[in-house]
């Protein structure tokens, strides 16, 4: 790196690979093998041989900076087409949504923590650039059977994560428990998940035997919660993408019950759009296209209560009948 190159414009990032990130092709370059490993575990290989990237990422790791955890809470701010994300005093990235280019500088200490990249940095990256490359990030859980996806949509405390785990234990593959990325490309609608952890409220220990006798390890909105790897912590089969076939909007009740009623495409689209982050006009138009395609699938309102396993069993029956 040349003397006085504070922005590291001349820093070498000779390691380059392409990935599929929620349906978008990402050109990723870095000077750190550990970041490539994290990217390989977070994203998927590019299927077509000669595909133009939808966005580019260039992350340089400073070997002289070895900051160590605990890391502060990430700081994200945007101004028009520029979005900045800071992770600690020596680690940050800047995204230009017009050119769909992301640059970043990270400490070697943070670069070494693969799980932090999988669960924090790469999800934030995709949240920032997703809409500009035609990806809609939805506040929903997702499970799948034979590549057919079931999306569970609802606000916090509606039971999305708990029902997703119960369905996964009943034979579905687990894709996401809180945030699902959806894309509409070349006439095909797909849902995508990242290699993040699953978050369950502290009372989940009374529903799932694998959690009995274990103490919550985290706080979620001030409440004790579990944060676990779906495969190794909960024993679930993990899937990375699927084709949405059914959307269920959740309304949780304190009393046991199961009432599934059809929802119009218009109402479903309106509910999905309420949770979208404000974007630039072109990005908003691409997100709207994804939402409209999602709303064409069978959509239902589920008012429910009681044991998640019982609700999952009823829901699975309806899903199989589609």
Image (cartoon, grey):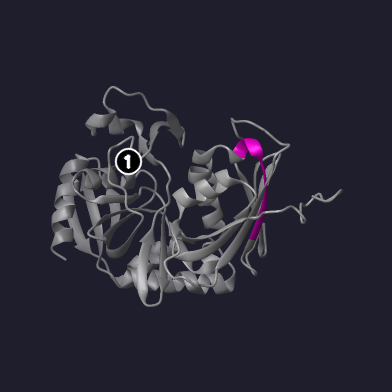
Among the 4 quarters of the image, the one containing residue 231: top left
Q: Residue 103 in magenta?
A: yes
Direction right: furthest residue: 3
Q: Is residue 276 left or right of residue 271?
A: right
Q: Is residue 66 left or right of residue 320?
A: right
Residue range of the region highlighted in magenta in the rendering:
102-110
Query: At x 29% / y 42%, what residue is drawn?
Result: 162
- Magenta stretch, main secondary structure, is strand
- Eyeballing the image, is 273 above or below 197? below
Which residue does the numbered mark 1 point to in the structure image? Answer: 231
> 10 Å neighbourhood of mark 1: few (<14), some, or many (≥20)?
few
Q: Give the x, y percent position of residue 103.
A: 67, 56
Query: At x 36% / y 24%, what residue is drawn?
Result: 215
Q: Is residue 68 left or right of residue 24?
A: right
221, 112: nearer the viewer: 112
Query: At x 55% / y 37%, what residue is drawn?
Result: 113
Q: Give the x, y percent position of residue 149.
A: 28, 60
Q: Can residue 257 be spotted in the picture?
A: no
Q: Can residue 162 be spotted in the picture?
A: yes
Q: Give the x, y percent position of residue 25.
A: 50, 65
Query: At x 57% / y 65%, what residue is drawn?
Result: 55
Q: Secondary structure at mark 1?
A: loop
Q: Give the x, y percent position of residue 307.
A: 19, 39
233, 155: nearer the viewer: 233
């Amino acid at each position: 790196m040349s003397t006085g190159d504070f922005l590291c414009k001349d820093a070498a990032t000779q390691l380059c690979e392409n990935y599929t990130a929620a349906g978008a092709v990402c050109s990723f370059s870095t000077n750190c093998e550990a970041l490539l490993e994290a990217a390989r575990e977070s994203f998927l290989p590019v299927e077509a041989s000669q595909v133009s990237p939808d966005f580019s990422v260039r992350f340089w790791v400073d070997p002289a900076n070895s900051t160590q955890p605990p890391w502060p809470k990430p700081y994200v701010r945007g101004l028009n087409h520029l979005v900045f994300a800071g992770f600690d005093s020596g680690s940050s990235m800047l995204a230009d949504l017009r050119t769909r280019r992301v640059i970043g500088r990270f400490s070697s200490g943070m670069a070494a923590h693969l799980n932090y990249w999988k669960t924090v940095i790469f999800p934030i990256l995709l949240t920032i650039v997703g809409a500009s490359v035609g990806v809609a990030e939805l506040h929903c859980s997702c499970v799948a059977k034979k590549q057919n996806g079931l999306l569970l949509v609802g606000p916090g405390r509606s039971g999305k994560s708990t029902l997703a785990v119960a369905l996964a234990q009943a034979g579905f593959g687990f894709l996401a428990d809180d945030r699902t990325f959806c894309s509409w490309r070349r006439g095909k609608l797909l849902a995508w998940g990242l290699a993040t952890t699953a978050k369950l409220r502290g009372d989940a220990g009374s529903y799932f035997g694998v959690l009995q006798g274990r103490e919550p390890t985290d706080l979620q909105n001030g409440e004790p919660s579990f944060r676990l790897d779906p495969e190794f912590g909960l024993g679930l089969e993990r899937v990375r993408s699927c084709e949405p076939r059914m959307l269920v909007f959740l309304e949780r009740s304190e009393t046991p019950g199961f009432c599934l009623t059809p929802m119009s495409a218009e109402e479903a689209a309106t509910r999905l759009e309420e949770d979208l982050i404000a974007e630039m006009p072109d990005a908003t138009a691409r997100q709207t296209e994804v939402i409209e395609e999602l709303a064409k699938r069978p959509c239902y309102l589920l008012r429910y209560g009681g044991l998640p396993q019982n609700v999952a069993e009823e829901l699975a029956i309806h899903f199989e009948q589609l």
